[in-house]
Amino acid sequence: MAARYEDLLPAIGAEDLGFGRWLFAQECVFLRGVVKMDGLPPADHPEIAFAGRSNVGKSSLVNALTGRKTLARVSNTPGRTRELNFFQLAGALNIVDLPGYGYARIERKLSDQWTKLIFSYLRGRATLKRVILLIDGRHGIKDSDNEAMEALDEAAVSYQLVLTKCDKLKTAELERMLRTTQERAARHGAAHPIVVPTSSELGLGIPELRALAAAASGLEPATLPGYKPAT
C-alpha cells in the first residue's frame, strides 16, 4: 500500500501534542530585533531558534506554528530579513527568527556580517535549547545547508531538520526526500534523528513540530500558569 503524507509524520504522544498546541496558542510578543551581539535580550528564558536558507519558508512556518498571520514577516524577496528577531511565547519561551543564509545576490560583505552574527549567537547562547533548521523539501540539503550543519556540529548546538513546502511534492517523492534527509542527518553528531516534513500552507506537520519544540525547550508544563492537561 502506498504511503500517505500522514504516515510520514513522526509519532508523538497525545499529551505532548496537547502541550505543544497549548504553548504555541499563548500570547506571543515581539521583544526586539538584534543586529549586534551586545543587543541580545537577557538570557533568562529557554530559546528555540529557526534557521534556513533565504526564501525557505521560515517566516511562514513561524507564523503557522503560532497560529498568527503576521508575527514573522513574510517576504518574496530572499535575504530581506536582516536581524535576529526575538519573540516571547507564554512569557516563558523565546522564539528566535534568524536571518536567512545562502543568497548569492546579497552584497558579500553584508552577507558575511550576517553569518558572523548568526553563528556568534549560536555558539555563545547558553539558553539556546535547539535550532530548527529548515530545508526546502523540493530541493533537499544544499551546500550552504551542509555548511550550517557542520557549524552547528562544531558548536555542539542541538538542531532538528525540518522539510518545508512539502505540499509541493507527491507522497512518493516526499518519502524519498525524507529518507535521504534522515540519512544525511545521521552523519552529523548534533542533528536530532527525527526529520519533520511540513507544509505551512496546509498545516501538515505543524502539530508534531510544536510538540517537539515544546519538549526541546525543557519547560515543565505543570509550572506554567493556566496550563491544564487535555483529558
Image (tube, grey):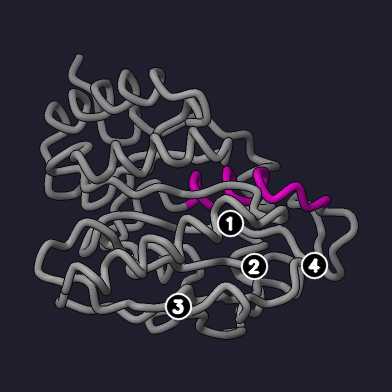
Q: Residue furthest top?
A: 1
Q: Amino acid at mark 2?
A: Asn
Instruction: In the rendered structure, find residue 48 and report the number of the disc placed on it.
Output: 1
Residue 109, quarter of the rendered image? bottom left
x, y percent for residue 21: 60, 58
| Secondary element at tag 3 | loop
Q: Amino acid at mark 1?
A: Ile
Lower sequence index among marks 2 and 3: 3
**Circle 3 residue:** 68
**Circle 2 residue:** 94
Q: Residue at x 20, y 14 (%)?
A: 1
* Position of 96 relative to 71 (above/below): above
Q: Nearer the viewer, mark 4 or mark 1?
A: 4
Q: Residue at x 47, y 40 (%)?
A: 152
Near mark 2 (Cα within 10 A), the count class, few <14, some 14-19 or many ≥20, is many
Queried whether the magenta region covers residue 219, the answer comes back as yes
Q: Give the magenta range.
A: 207-220
Q: How many angstroms separate mark 2 from mark 3 (CA)?
A: 16 Å
| Secondary element at tag 2 | strand
Q: Nearer the viewer, mark 3 or mark 4?
A: 4
